[in-house]
Amino acid sequence: KIDVSTHLVKMSTSITLENTGKSPIKSFLYALEPSLQNYLSIITANVKDKDEKLGVSQTTVASKKDLSFWRIELPSNLEPGKTMTVDVDSSYAHALTPYPAEITQSQKQQVLYNGNVYFFSPYSTKSQTTTVTTTNTAIESYSKSPKPVSQTDRTVTYGPYEQREAFSEAELRVHYENNSPFLTVTNLERIIEVSHWGNIAVEEHISMRHTGALLKGPFSRYDYQRAQDGLSSIKAFKTVLPAAARDVYYRDEIGNISTSNLKEMDDFVELELRPRFPLFGGWKTQYYIGYNVPSYQYLFNKGDNYALKMRFVDHIFDDMVVDQVTVKIILPEGAKNMRLETPYPVTQGENQLHFTYLDTTGRPVIVIHKSNLVEQHIQDFQLHYTFQKLLLLQEPLIVVGAFYLLFLAVIVYVRLDFSITKDEAKESKMRVASLVEEVQSAHDRRSALYQSYDDAINKYKSTKDANTFAATRKKVDADYKSLTQQISDLQTKLKNEGSDLAEKVNELQVSDRQYKDLVALAITLAEKLVSGKINKQQYLDNEKINKTKREDLDSKMEALRSSLA
Amino acid sequence: MLVLSIAAILSFSTRLFSVLRFESVIHEFDPYFNYRTTRYLTEEGFYSFHNWFDDRAWYPLGRIIGGTIYPGLMVTSAVFYHALWFFNITIDIRNVCVFLAPMFSSFTTLVTYWFTKELKDAGAGLVAAAMIAIVPGYISRSVAGSYDNEGIAIFCMLLTYALWIKSVKTGSLFWSCLCALAYFYMVSSWGGYVFLINLIPLHVLALMLTGRFSHRIYVAYSAVYCIGTILSMQISFVGFQPVQSSEHMAALGVFGLCQMHAFIDYVRSKLSVEQFNILFRSIVLMGAVVSLSVAAIGTATGKISPWTGRFYSLLDPSYAKNNIPIIASVSEHQPTTWSSFYFDLQMLTIMFPAGLYFCFNRLTDANIFIIMYGVTSIYFAGVMVRLMLVLAPVMCILSGIGVSSTLNTYMKNLDVSRKDKKTSKKNVDHTYPFKNEVATGVVFLVTAFLITYTFHCTWVTSEAYSSPSIVLSARAGDGGRIIFDDFREAYYWLRHNTPEDAKVMSWWDYGYQITAMANRTILVDNNTWNNTHISRVGQAMASTEDKAYEIMRELDVNYVLVIFGGLTGYSSDDINKFLWMVRIGGSTDRGAHIKEADYYTPQGEFRIDKEGSPTLLNCLMYKMCYYRFGEVYTEGGKPTGYDRVRNAEIGNKNFDLDVLEEAYTTEHWLVRIYKVKDLDNRGA
């Protein structure tokens, strides 16, 4: 059975084997047709109605050097005389030739398939039929021999033929209309970046090309829009991404491509991509898409041993053909002992190092190449490696360290004096300023003490408790003395600095002494009043005079204090 | 400090509208060239950049990029890029370019603060910084993605001015040297440095005339001029211009005058008055004669080049219109309208005179400078729309001074009267009734002005200045947004589906974009250095098909690209620019057969419908734009081929192209690309 309805040739052969020999056989050979052997993408085999894949490996036969053979392992030995049915599926890319090779915009695309009517086999064949399925009923021509040949709808049936020799050939030629997208990814670069912080970023750089019949003559947008022709052109295609894909972007070298639609299905995400321009035969384009997936679905670990299980290639469009693929897997910094397992043979390139945010030694990159892939190649690969979990802390620590150093540098810079010459005047000014500040605060505390003198006097007047009063007075006196002493010390210092503010402080001290005298007077008055030496009226009069004086002094001192600054 | 950092952050973020709304792409035309050269610089290194001969542009002439650009912008972003990569911060060079302008505008905010603080005080500085952070006149050139020289040049300019003021104030060599360095940076990044090198001498001259000349100014100017000129000559594009071209002569003259003034001052201090007078007269006479004759000889022998066209058009706005159509054809070089003054500056137009008044009130050396800067730049901005950019900062500074002084005056009144109320009411000033009320009113008024200014600026930024011209968007009938991405569609098509060495002919506006995005060779681009070459392209566009074919064969053109807005209503398309092509095409000898009058109807109208002149209806540009357009229905109720930009049914509908074939037309017909057919195999 040959299906040529898309741009791929899909050949599914159902072979009934019969062991006519004497000994049981374990495997058999499958030969590729000489005309197709260069186009082979994938070949798989399974026993009929069973899913289990059979082992397929390429071998050569000494007598037929120019042919390529595949050895298919049978699940169980085939005893002599027994039969077994095996299905062999193979896909061939680029096996169809557009004919004519150049068409205009409005023409339909026609292709030519050249093959072999007979089953090309190293063994003799007892009975066989071949059917060719085309895209639609518009079949231009097909080879009419060897008979019997019949056509119904979109299938052409050859055979049945009986008793054919091994390697028998007869030309099969079908010329038919095929407007399915002849889209080929000429180069695919798939970058998988694994982060142990729970994310895997995937980015695919795709260059694609329309490999159908070339466009001949002009492209008319008018005809394209009005007449809905350009049947062979590709306007859009659908890409299926994993269900967990987030933050999908679709861009190219010159920016975002705005013509895309994202549909979220239950078990996958469907992305409808429209290239910037419709692709006609021979036209090509380039773009990249990227997305993030959570790592728990793909990354498994046991202790420090990790295993990454992801698709080697992912779906790009239905019936895709990828000529050349490069997969790059970027592991976190410090990953070691990488071991790769793939479902089919690949070529592994040299490992590289990748530097990005906060890297010191670089991240290991595994590079894998493979050519000629189709949809059946969407299979998982496994990558085993070891990674110490403590290394996860490295990057946050770098950030913390950097900020720490920055702050430290600022602290050091602010504290240190980098000037080459000492600016004496400035220094002295600063010293004076700090002295003045001290004077002011001392004076403030002293004013507070005056208040406590008043409080003490009032309390004494009401309680008439001479002992307490004396004690309080003593305490306040001591405080007062030390403060006054402090201020005069500061005054001397100011004088040493040669500041004229010393004068003002001196003035302050003088008024303070007067104030203190007045306070002392107030105390004596109060004592006299308590002991009954003067009557209330006298006391009040004296006290009033005293108080006015005190207030004047107070405001004078206050003015002096503020003039200091 | 806090206000300042908020202003700086604001100035960065307000410019990100376009990135959020569209994506991080480069806008406009020139930035694409800058982007391309920057990419080259980062990939190839400085030396190959310096020696870069670009064969992608000006086919077949080519262009020596290294020697014909101001490399400041590219070097700056390359330095940023490498610094980031050194720390393994893998940011794309495109993103560096996109975000460079907003970053520099936040630096500008800081510099403005410092500058205004030097001029007046910290309060005015803060107001000015906040204003410049959002002034639309500056935002228009520094939104994220407009990766142009002006973006960093304004920063350099203000930095140079601030350092100049500082050095004038202190007279210290240190500041003068820094100023010269800033001037060097300015020279390396923008051709507008000529303004700077004329303004500073002008300031010095003004100071001399007002008798404020002092040793400080002598030191500052001598140092800045000598070091600055020598440094500026290191830029290969500038070369020997600072000592040869007329634009720089003023600086040289003032430098000489400076020396003389200083010398005379010295002599005066040594001699008696009569002796001095005799000496003075003779020296002045001698000096005048000598300098005049030197200038005359220099001009005659070609050592001193005459003024360039753009410079002439600055002094005489009608000059370009009459003589060089290519300068006049750029919309940026048109005189500014009043509405655009208000649009770009809003309340600053009102506060500017107030600021000037306050500056005159307290005349200092620095204030004289800012006054001169304001007055000259307002003249230049009036002549050329583009120079609005130079005006915007000084507007902000002067308005900052104005607003802050006004507020200072009235705030004081406010505070005094309040205190009065609290304590006792005996101090009420009877000479000034309603003091408090007036003060409150003024304060409220100014506040209201500032608030409306903020809203206006935000609105202008988001509506007018944040759309990348490369992606167009329109409102659909249902309120959704339609994005016309036709330019990139076409450029990308060119990039992938034409031969690597294809030569593309288009009008020069699109030159930079085509080289940057499509990576194809073009004939003319936005660096309009060769007038005749552009004129040749204009002739091809304006001729009939046969004539055009000859020109295109001669220029070895493979593809022709035109912009056509007739289907979508995009008004700045090639048909609307066509008259300039005709004018420029006809401005050289070889295009003498192209006369502007032929393209008008007898009534003197430019029409594309049946009434239009037959020359127009048969020229190449017309045919390329309207090829097969005659069959399209664009609007309901109108006949086919109805042009939505010019609101007319096209006059010439059914025609075929003989020498060209349609190669590609984008989805909305914005860009149409034609392939030039080969010569027939057989002679027809």
Image (cartoon, rainbow, N blue to C red):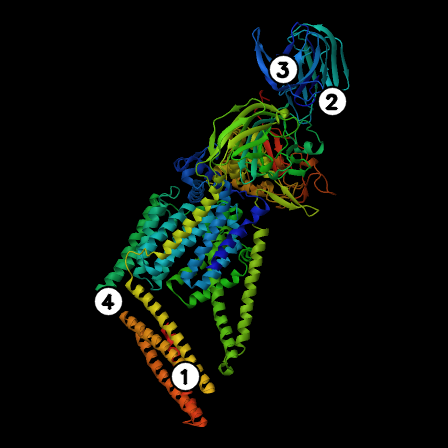
Q: Nearer the viewer, mark 4 or mark 3?
A: 3
Residue B253 appears in the figure = no
Does label 1 or label 2 sit earlier along the sequence? 2
Gap between marks 1 and 3 measured at Cα: 118 Å
Name the residue type under label 2: Asn
| Between B244 and A179, the one nearer to me in the picture | A179
Asked if labels 1 and 2 share a chain, the reply is yes
Quarter location, residue A360: top left
| Between B56 and B650, the one nearer to me in the picture | B56
**Which residue corresponds to mark 3?**
A73
**Which residue corresponds to mark 4?**
B273
Where is residue B681? Give x, y as percent.
58, 20
Quadrant (top left/top right/bottom left/bottom right) for the C terminus of chain B? top right
- Could you say whether the residue bearing mark 2 is in a helix, strand or loop? loop
- Could you say whether the residue bearing mark 4 is in a helix, strand or loop? helix
Gap between marks 1 and 4 measured at Cα: 90 Å
Residue B444, above or below A243: below
Quarter location, residue B82: top left
**Which residue corresponds to mark 1?**
A467
Does label 1 or label 3 sit earlier along the sequence? 3
Q: Nearer the viewer, mark 1 or mark 3?
A: 1
Pointer 3 local density, CA inside 10 Å: few below 14, some 14–19, many at least 20: some
> Chain for mark 4?
B
Gap between marks 1 and 2 measured at Cα: 123 Å
> Chain for mark 1?
A
> Chain for mark 3?
A
Asked if labels 1 and 3 share a chain, the reply is yes
Q: Is residue A514 left or right of residue B575?
A: left
Pointer 1 local density, CA inside 10 Å: few below 14, some 14–19, many at least 20: few
